[in-house]
Image (cartoon, grey):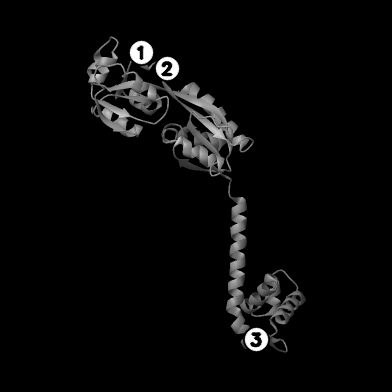
Amino acid sequence: MNIENIEAFVYVIHCGSFNKAAEALFLSQPSVTARIKTLEQELNCKLFIRDGKQVQISEDGKRFLPFAQQMLHTYNTGKLYLNQKKSLPNEYRIGCTISAANYMVSDLIPYLKESFPAASFKIITGTSDSIATKTLNKEVDIGLVRKLQHPALQSHRLYVDPIRLYVYRDHPFHLDNGHISVEEVAKEPLVFFECGSLDWLRIHRIFENLEQPPNIGIQTDNSEAARKLIIRGAGIGFLPSLSVRQDVAEGLLVPVLLPETEGIALQTNVIACPGEHAELYAAVVQFSKKWCASDC
């Protein structure tokens, strides 16, 4: 059944005549008449009663009208939906760790919007392993994860985030101009942020040779919770530098030199399936070079 024939039928009823329907549809009157006749043949009934120049809808026409209107409405709605989908920007799905979401994405997305003005972006957070799996399964287009190598993924280093000891501004370590020892740190109440990274295990190792274990009063897997607890004086702790850069600038937290932690850092990489979303992948790499030059 041709939707144009149904359209002609509905327009004739709506406009009140074949001539007015033809004008509304930008057709000739014979074309509208031909469409109605074809529809009547398909339905095997008369839709209109013709009396000279007068045309009235038949009983069969009245019964068919609500179905014709519904079909025409459904067709036009579907057509509008498809046209809208064609005009909508591409959606890029970016998977990332909580850390990348908190401290990098807010700068990354505006940069990508400049490079891809017609695109929309969806941020999906998870662990590095889960984001890698989503990337492999094409559930995300690229991933921002901890240092990770996978034979089926391409990977590029975005930034390296040093792990340092931070104390609140009134803590005695802040006032001590000399080097702080691991033994002194171990005696202090510690707010211990545990991110699960292999690099983070090196923080544990600096306390391995002590006679007494470190005084870990609070453990959390959330860097934001650890950061706020340290600011409020609940203890001191080791944190990625990016997570506290604003607090350090405002004097709320103070980094303390501890030689044993030199070189310990968390690395974040961008990953993608080889050959896919190459422009997006390259744009993220380019962004990281500019971003690290000013912020890392």
The answer to whether residue 174 is visible is no
Q: Which image quadrant: the C terminus?
A: top left
Amino acid identity at mark 2: Gly
- Image-based side of 165 in relation to 49, left or right: left
Q: Nearer the viewer, mark 3 or mark 1?
A: 1
Q: Image height check: is 171 above or below 17?
A: above
Q: Secondary structure at mark 1?
A: helix
- In the rendered image, the vertical position of residue 89 relative to residue 209, given as above or below: below
Which residue sits at x=46%, y=35%? 128
Residue at the (27%, 16%) spot, across then down: 210
x then y, percent, for residue 154: 58, 31
Q: Nearer the viewer, residue 69 or 93?
A: 93
Q: Residue 94's mark?
A: none
Q: CA distance from mark 3 to mark 1?
A: 95 Å
Could you say where residue 158 lies in the image, as x and y percent from the top left?
Answer: 51, 27
Q: Comparing marks 3 and 2, which lies closer to the viewer?
A: 2
Q: Which residue is mark 1?
A: 259
What amino acid does circle 1 point to?
Answer: Pro
Q: Which residue is at the front of the view, 270 or 71?
A: 270
Of 159 and 296, the residue lying toward us = 159
- Alpha-carbon distance for marks 3 and 2? 89 Å
Q: Indicate left or right for 237 with 25 as reference.
A: left
Q: How busy is the neighbourhood of tag 2: few (under 14 within 10 Å), some, or many (20 plus)?
A: few
Tell me the residue at 59%/69% (across/down).
73
Q: CA distance from mark 2 to mark 1?
A: 9 Å
Is residue 219 something that shows in the picture?
yes
To which quarter of the image does residue 178 belong?
Answer: top left
Q: Are marks 3 and 2 in contact (CB under 8 Å)?
A: no
Question: Which residue was labeled with disc 3?
Answer: 56
On screen, residue 61 above or below 76: below
Check disc 2 and report the residue beneath it: 263
Inspect the image, locate mark 3, and give the three-letter code of the amino acid beneath it. Gln
